Amino acid sequence: MLKISNKASANLSLIFSGVFMAALTVMYFIMPLLITRFCDVVNVIRPVSKLGYIYLGIIGYLVLIVATATDILLFALLFRVKRGLVFSERSVAYIRYISWSVFAEAFLFLLIAPYSLIGIFIFIAAFMLGMALRVVKNVISEAVQIKIENDFTV
Amino acid sequence: MRIEINLDVVMAKRKISLSELSQRVGISMANLSILKNNKAKAIRFSTLEALCRELQCSVGDIIAYIPDDK
C-alpha cells in the first residue's frame, strides 16, 4: 500500500485545497449557467418559476460563499499542521468553525430539496460529515489538554 | 483549594540563583521558571527529589496546600 510522509501528505492536502479554491473561483462565474442547467433538469418534472430560479441562484451563491470560507479555514489549519502547531486551542477552534460550515452547507442543500431529491441526499452526507468533524474536534480538544499538561509537567 | 509552589522563597533562603539551581538539578531554566511562577500542571517525583536534595529542604517547604477559604 502506498504510504507517503506526513510532510508530503500535508503538501498534497494543500494542493487539493488550492485546486478546490480555483474550482470555486471558476464556479462563481459560471453559477448562473449551472443554475440554468439545473432548472432545465428540474423543468422536466415540474416547471421552475422566475422566482424559483432566483431562489436557487441565491442558494447556489450561498453554498459557494460557505465553501470558500471553509476552504480558507482548511488552508489555515493545514499551515498550522505544517508548522507543527496542530495541537492548540486555535486549531480546535478552526475545526469547530469547519464543522459548523459543513452543517451550514447541509442545511443549504436541504433548501433545494423541494426542487430535487438530490438535496436531501447531500444534506444527509454533509450532516454526517459535520458530525464526524465535531467528534474529531472533541478528540483534538482532549489531545490539546493532554499536551498542555505534558508541556507543563516539570 | 490550590497547590502553591514556594520555590522562590526556598531559593531566596538558600541564596541560590535560578541558573545555578538549574545546573545543579539538571532541569532547564525554562522548566524551573514554569515551576517557580506556579504555571506547572504537574511535577515529577525525580524533580522533587533533586530539588529537595540540592536545596536541603523537605517537600513541604517547596509545595504548600492552600484551602479555598484562605
Image: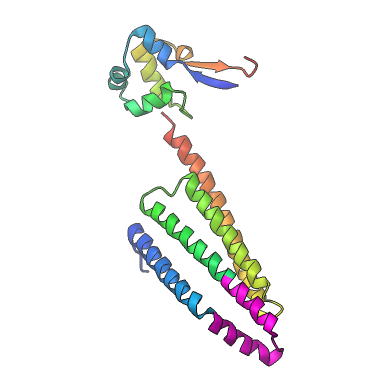
Residue A103 visible to an observer of this rendering: yes
Q: Position of residue A24 (x, y in %)?
A: 47, 72
Q: In which quadrant of the rendered image does the C terminus of chain A lie? A: top left
What span is colored magenta in the figure?
A32-61
Residue A72, relative to residue A144: is it above or below?
below
Q: Residue at x 51, y 40 (%)?
A: A145
Let me know if residue A37 is in the magenta part: yes
Q: Residue at x 37, y 62 (%)?
A: A9
Q: Position of residue B66 (x, y in %)?
A: 57, 16
Prevailing secondary structure of the magenta residues? helix
Whether residue B52 sits left or right of residue A49 in the image: it is: left
Count the numbered circles shown: 0
Q: In which quadrant of the rendered image does the N terminus of chain A lie? A: bottom left
Let me know if residue B59 is in the magenta part: no
* Residue at the top extreme, as displayed: B13
Q: Position of residue B40 (x, y in %)?
A: 46, 28
Compare residues A96 and B21 and report the one nearer the observer: A96
Residue A128 visible to an observer of this rendering: no
Q: Residue at x 68, y 81 (%)?
A: A52
Residue A8, relative to residue B46: is it above or below?
below
* Residue at the bottom extreme, as displayed: A44
